[in-house]
Image (cartoon, helix red, strand yellow):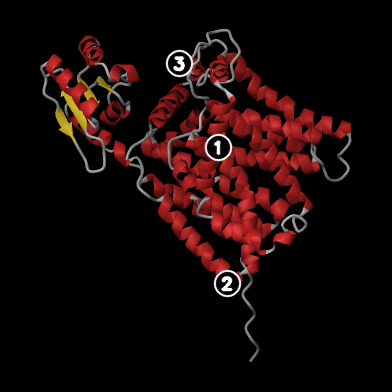
Amino acid sequence: MPAAPAAAPPSFERAAAGLWLLGLLLRLGAIGHGAVISRDGIAYLEIARWALAGDIDALLRAHYPPGFPAALALLARPFGLGETSGAVAAALLSSLVVPATILLVARAAGRRAGLCAGLLAAALPGFVTIGAEVLSDGPYLSALAWTLVLARRLHERGGPAAGLGAAALGGLAYLTRPEALVVLGATALGLLVLPRPGERTGARARLADLGWLLLPGLLVVVPYLLAIRAHPVLGGVEGAGRFKLTLKQDLPQLLAAAHPALVAGNAARLVGRAAVVLAPALPLALAGWAARPWTSVAGTSAPGRRLGVFLALVGLPLLLAFAVVRPDPRFALQLALLAVPAAGAGLARALRAWPRGGRVALVVLVLVCAAGGLRDRHERKATYRDVGALLEAGGARRVLAEDTRAAFYAGAEATPRLSPEEEQDPAAIVRRATTEGFDALVLVARTPEQQATSRAVAEALGVEPETVERAGAEPLHLFWLAR
């Protein structure tokens, strides 16, 4: 009896689709493990409502670029624009980083390395948890990855199709997060100075490809830059009529405050946080690279080396830009994504060196990542959901609080929250609470200083607060003002 034919290995396309599905399911699963929405998420939902209403002027006055809110409005509208539908839309957009990472790496380092890199983009907890939030960061990682795919195609092959695609995606990425301008700038510089394969190495070919990249990109970027000139920067000194890259940060103010020690310290913290994002995969990836150290350079393909140089060209100015602003952990996710191709190549080497052990290690890696990605988040702020329910049941329409989530979960009006200075000043709190027509006041009572502030406010108002507590979350004091 003839032996049964060996089962055919799964195709690259099926494996890539499976990894995308894994990334999507992990992000959807992580939505239920977020106790509360972020404050930025509340703002994005509000801006998305302006987009649905067609209020272009409000979109341009918003301190966040309009790209992500517009995408939220488009995707979440059929289901009602809210916390859950917004998170599902963000998860769907965020999961698109997986196929982009696979394509980026597979073309340069082989299909096995591409799939390993895609696994990391799908499952690393940092990417999963940010992809489950109503935030622009997860969708921006997808836009960044697809911009890199087309930018690499432009570098390798040239031509209008790749240039137009990279410019369009880079422009849309800029309308999601302004640091995409750094990526477009690095891509333009790379077209001029980096080694290129084939016949498109002359100055004329390089300039032609640069034109395909920049001209369409300017059609997206410049109109927005001109439009926001009429509006001031959040908390900055830049007024109307002055050139600015974003309404969220006052760049001259940031640059004036920057100094070498601050920038170097921020850069070190960002690199450390990017390493934390990659930490679950680092042992196996480094072991794979160390398995044949004498081939780590000579055994890497020319496209792989060119990709590494290109990603370094993008990553270094991004690191510098972030270090000038602040060492935000969310910035570190972009740096980690730029390191995923090297980590994926290391995993692929480990699979070649230890076929059975490597596969077992990959399964363990996925399980560890899933546990991390599906952990509960924002538990410390969970009491805002509880106080919101009390406020809604009591009919509060205007709520004064240190955090906008109190009003959000009450279904109340969005009103300016207490500033950090007002939070420490009982007289300022009482003045706002009694003169601006609020129905309720919510204060945090975690530290002794906060508790003392709450007691002083209670004495001045003559109102005893209701305490809202939950294990592991910060206690809140609810003052009813209209009873």
Report x, y in % for residue 32. Answer: 35, 46
Mark 3: few, some, or many residues within 10 Å (few <14, many ≥20)? Answer: few
Residue drawn at x 49%, y 24% is 64
Q: In which quarter of the image is residue 162?
A: top right
Instruction: Specify whether 265 is left or right of 186.
Output: left
Who comes first in sequence, dot 1 or dot 3?
A: 3
Give whichever of 306, 50 is nearer the camera: 306
Q: Residue 268, labelled with which disc? A: 1
Circles 1, 2 touching at the beta carbon (< 8 Å):
no
Among the two numbered marks 2 and 3 on one chain, the one whose residue lies closer to the N terminus: 3
Residue 132 sits in which quadrant?
A: top left
Q: Find disc 3 in the rendering and name its residue.
A: 235
- Please name the residue that numbered disc 2 is placed on: 356
SS category of the residue bearing label 2: helix
Amino acid type, mark 1: Ala
Q: Earlier in the sequence, mark 1 or mark 2?
A: 1
Q: Residues under labels 1 and 3: Cα distance?
A: 27 Å
Q: Left or right of 155: which side holds 65?
A: left
Q: Which amino acid does label 2 sit on?
A: Arg
